[in-house]
Amino acid sequence: MPLYGVVAQEARGHVVTAVLIAMVAMLFTAISYGRMARVYPSAGSAYAYIAGEFGPLPGSLTGWAVLMDYVLNPLICIIWCSSAIANFIPGVPVPVWKIFFALLFTALNLRGVESSAATNKWLAIAMGAVVAYLLFCFTRFVLLNGPHTWDAFGKPFYDPSTFSVRAISVGTSIAALTYIGFDSISTLSEEAIHPHRDILLATVFTCLLTGVLAAVEVYAAQLVWPDFRSFPNLETAYVYVAGRAGGPVAFGILNATLLIATIGSGAAAMLGAARLLYGMGRSGALPRTFAHISPHTNIPNWNVIICGAVALIGALTVSYQLGAELLNFGAFLAFLGVNASAFHHYWLKGRDRSWSQGLPPILGGAICFYIWLSLRPQAKVVGFTWMAIGLAYYFVRRFSRAASSSPSTGQY
């Protein structure tokens, strides 16, 4: 829902098509994640899979790309929360709200405030009820106001007046953010009852369920508000669609629900970024400064403050769309690597050369690569700059370690 307006603009109204194309790529990639979880059951990450198959340099670059994703996630949450709360309190400038939410996310994490499993369960139930209510409102609106022609019902999938392969490709590169997070299932191999079967099935079914629900949501929204050029605000476009179908009540309920959900997501993402920096500092991948832990809260508080500052600076300088594309830049590099790892392990190194071993990672990798290429030039420039910094840091660290470990041969 938060992505709806931006994707509608870039894909020229073909949001449901973009969501479904992204789902195909994610389904094949989910198969590769599930298969690689069998090979590296205790690690469960793109970094572990790629490093295990191709060596430390590709693995380190993957970890660097994933680090960018973790840092960017709270950034785009701050931007969206600021637009959402402005719908309730429009008199306050949006930059002020960005500062407020950056401080809020940072303060929540410094105090060690985390939601429990029970809280998350009830939030999920409440949000599911809101989605059901909105779909009821959308259905009622369409029955009363139209469209009532088969041509209009098909336009969300294909509208000849606005169709463009390039536009849908760019829209798909953003819509793929809908699925980000499914790969975390691969980290649960040690907890699964039957990991060889269940991790693969859980990952695939998560992508499938996410895609089907998202497609239904955006399809209904496109029927209610067909003109993608007329949204009052792109970042909260779905909220305005809800308002057209269900009036001020639906508008307020959805805006509040998404605001609460995004606050929780943003705060959790910031803590995840801080913990990732801590892990990289502890392992030596980053300077030891990042391995600091607060003795009172057992939280990497310095990292939380760093992540909060980076998120605030980013929220004040980049758009929601660019932040989402940058997040997908790193994510799709990781997805490409996982598909390549699955192909390398099961088809090139394995004895089974059947199409079932080779075709899924090839198709998943090809579609992911195409979606990655469809990112706008701005995202690629910033993304490649980030990767170049990571590559330089890798070699500097490697050469400094080699120099410190080699015996001195000089004379005084």
Image (tube, grey):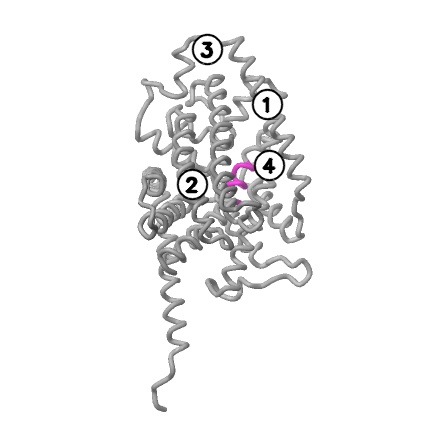
- Looking at the rendered structure, the kind of residue marked 1 is Ala
Q: Which residue is disc 2 drawn over?
A: 31
- Looking at the rendered structure, the kind of residue marked 3 is Pro
Element class at badge 1: helix
Can you tell which quarter of the image residue 412 is in? bottom left
Main SS of residues in magenta: helix
Q: Position of residue 81 (x, y in %)?
A: 56, 37
Q: Which mark is residue 132?
A: 1
Instruction: Give, as a single range, the part of the protein colored magenta.
Output: 74-82
In the image, taking residue 265 as reference, residue 31 lies left or right, namely left
Q: How far, Cα to Cα, is label 3 from label 4? A: 32 Å
Q: Earlier in the sequence, mark 2 or mark 1?
A: 2
Q: Which residue is disc 3 drawn over?
A: 147
- Looking at the rendered structure, the kind of residue marked 2 is Ile
Q: Residue 23 carries which label?
A: none
Q: Are marks 4 and 2 in contact (CB under 8 Å)?
A: no
Q: Are marks 2 and 1 in contact (CB under 8 Å)?
A: no
Element class at badge 3: loop
- Looking at the rendered structure, the kind of residue marked 4 is Ala
In the image, taking residue 15 as reference, residue 300 lies left or right, namely right
Q: Which residue is disc 4 drawn over?
A: 261
Q: Do the residues labelled 3 and 2 touch (CB within 8 Å)?
A: no
Discs 4/2, front: 2
Q: How far, Cα to Cα, is label 2 from label 1? A: 30 Å
Q: Earlier in the sequence, mark 4 or mark 2?
A: 2
